[in-house]
Amino acid sequence: MNIESIRKDFPILERKVHDKPLVYFDNAATTQKPKQVIDSVNDFYSNYNANVHRGLHALSEEASEAYEKAHEKVGNFINSEWDEIVFTKNTTESLNILAYSLGLDLKKDDEVLITKMEHHANFVPWQYLGKKLGFKVKYVDITKDGELDMQSFDSLLTNKTKIVSVIHVSNTLGTINPVKELIEKAHDKNALAIVDGAQSIPHMEIDVKDLNCDFFAFSGHKMLAPTGTGGLFGKKEAFEEMNPFLFGGEMISSVSVEKTEWNMLPWKFEAGTPHVAGGIGIGAAVDYLNKIGMDKILKHEHKLVEYALNALKDVKGIQLYGPKTDKRAGVISFNIADIHPHDVASVLDTHGIAVRAGAHCTHPLLHALGVEHTVRASFYIYNTEKEIDVLIDALNDAVKIFGV
Amino acid sequence: MEAKELYNETILKAYKNPLNKGKIDPADLEFGGGNRSCGDSVTYTLKLKNNKVEDIKFEGHGCSLSLASASLLTEIVKGKTIEEILNLKAQDIYDIIGETAKARSKCALLGIIVLQTGLARHQKNPKETKIENVKI
Ligand SMILES: Cc1ncc(COP(=O)(O)O)c(C=O)c1O
């Protein structure tokens, strides 16, 4: 994996921020885009922009073919069929589709099991619908180190559990959860298993057949694709049983006053004109990731995290959160003494470094850890150890300014 | 921009040793509120005399910029009438804490927005002497 040549593919990495080279460590929020992805979108708009599935003209046929092909590429990427992939605008939409479609069928005594580690996108929809419809939502505890408490999981999973929905990799702590094991346990109770893969699919090989999850939600924009892109994998049987959430054009096969028939998969869940350019962009992103190899990406980030954790240890007043072991992806959350995370992020910004500071849409998780907010650095394929050195220098600057 | 420009002496001094920190009890007026997205919040308690601010204290929670400017504001408004305070502009804050703080306007202006919103509402309806959740 040649980082220098990878970096050349990302035009934005040439830019300066406050006269310093950009160090982009906010990849868990959204990643930068390589020119291959930007070009694919540009090519679509410049050469074959049209609506899909409708027109009997050359442009529409070309657009439809490319859009379908993108589903196939994503399907291959996670070892599913092309028609088990629904394009959405992001993980949030994917999870809301599930909560609404599946939640509507739940009865009063039914239970949904999620965890306190969830992003709000996998927390609030269930909580809201549970209150509205009367089903019960239970929340798995987490340990002090920021891992799922397996005893808590086992005790909360019951014969009433109909849906288990868990975060694969924590966007706040980087914790990699043993989802395969959780899915198996869910299936033992005949519950459906949903994985929030927003932070796993960009960084590691995903095989939905091996995981055996019923659904897998993800964001394209966190894996090099354009903003406004995401997806939802569903096992064919699960998707066929599930009712659509959005209704309208494209998602029907026939409509009459008496009756409407849903369209075939995956279009049943893609109502209205989709983000065609974005879909084509995800296809290009997947091509790009495949060319590098997901195993290499995982190794690269692992090396960065190891390097960073080691260097961060020596920053005065540092408090690191999350697992200390190998169970961590390329995400590091920390605080420095009692300096407010926004102040830390602001100092880093003056050094050209982009990080996120706040609660990272995980209030219940931080609450469980007894923390209000953190600074988060998250890595991707184009980041280097040299950039981590820049981060450490900048943190030492913050220590000096605030007199830790 | 260098970090030292944004976090200049004025801000760091006011952050580390804030003036007028605390709570006046009983107070004539009390206005609190904050920025929900970042969680920063500030509460002002005031004593009035002859329609002027005789004393003011603040309590807050947040980053150095919002707390420093919330504190510095207390010194600006002491002795001023409500009208005079309502006429203060964002620039009056930047004149003190530095132009670089414009990059973080939500923090820099937290205090003044809470105070002016509270005073404006009180002026419209004098019965409103305590407002707890001004949103900015
Ligand atoms: C674990 C996790 N789930 C869900 C989301 C929501 O993703 P999006 O904002 O793309 O909908 C994110 C990203 O912020 C995330 O990290």
Image: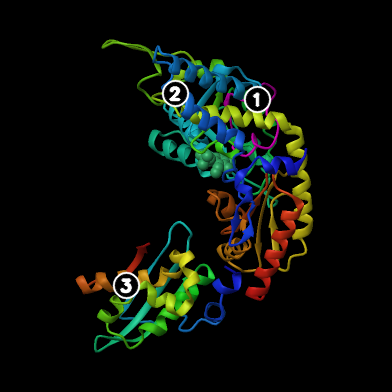
Label 3: element kind: helix
Q: Position of residue A94 (x, y in %)?
A: 50, 31
Residues under labels 1 and 2: Cα distance? 20 Å
Instruction: Name the quadrant where ligand 1 sits.
Output: top right
Q: Position of residue A211 (x, y in %)?
A: 68, 26
Q: Quadrant of residue A218?
A: top right
Residue B116 tag number:
3
Which quarter of the image is occupied by the N terminus of chain A? top right
Label 2: element kind: loop
**Residue at left offset 74%, top offset 43%:** A3
Q: Position of residue A67 (x, y in %)?
A: 51, 21
Q: How is the image coloured?
A: rainbow
Q: Nearer the viewer, residue A345 or A84?
A: A345
Label 1: element kind: helix
Residue A141 falls inside the magenta stretch: no
Query: How many other residues sit within 10 Å of disc 3, few (<14), some (14-19) or many (≥20)?
Result: some
Q: Give the residue pinned by disc 2.
A: A270
In the displayed structure image, the side of residue A185 where residue B8 appears, left or right: left
Residue A248 drawn above or below residue B85: above
Residue A77 tag number:
1
Residues under labels 3 and 2: Cα distance? 48 Å
Q: Nearer the viewer, residue B93 or A164?
A: B93
Q: Amino acid at mark 1?
A: Phe
Tell me the magenta residue range: A191-220
Q: Amino acid at mark 2?
A: Glu
Identify the chain of the residue marked 1, using the numbered disc in the image: A
Residues under labels 1 and 3: Cα distance? 55 Å
Q: Nearer the viewer, residue A164 or B108?
A: B108
